[in-house]
Image: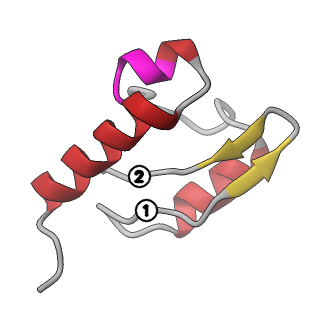
């Protein structure tokens, strides 16, 4: 069975707390808060738009490192 949205978010937050190298997002379980157009690098915005709600991206490489995205809305 596919994971439920609550379980997906819980797993994502746990992974962010243990794997993230960004102090700010690590402390918040990877939560960036509300993100508007222009807030993220273009490659991250493009990946976020392509995700379904509760979808998790493949790793995305930028000049700041590797990123995973979880779309919540």
Kind of element beneath mark 1: loop
Distance between the alpha carbons at the discs numbered 2 and 1: 4 Å
Q: Give left or right: position of 5 versus 11.
A: left
Residue depicted at 39% across the width and 26% down the height: 33
User: Is 28 covered by the magenta stretch?
Assistant: yes
Q: Give left or right: position of 18 versus 37.
A: left
Residue depicted at 11% across the width and 53% down the height: 6
Residue depicted at 88% across the width and 37% down the height: 63
User: Is 47 covered by the magenta stretch?
Assistant: no
Q: Earlier in the sequence, mark 2 or mark 1?
A: 1
Task: Give the answer, above or below, for where 51 lies relative to 12.
Answer: below
Closer-to-camera residue (18/40):
18
- Residue that badge 2 annotates: 70
First to last magenta residue range: 25-31
Cβ atoms at labels 2 and 1 below 8 Å apart: yes
- Residue that badge 1 annotates: 56
- Find residue 18 and report its horizontal and vertical position in percent: 42, 32
Closer-to-camera residue (19/67):
19
User: In the current view of this chain or complex, which residue is farthest to the right?
Assistant: 63
């Amino acid at each position: 069975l596919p994971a439920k949205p609550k379980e997906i978010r819980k797993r994502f937050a746990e992974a962010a707390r243990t794997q993230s190298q960004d102090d700010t997002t690590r402390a918040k379980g990877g939560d960036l808060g509300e993100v508007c157009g222009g807030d993220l690098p273009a490659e991250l915005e493009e990946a976020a738009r392509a995700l379904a709600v509760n979808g998790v991206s493949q790793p995305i490489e930028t000049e700041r490192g590797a990123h995973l995205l979880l779309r919540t809305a």
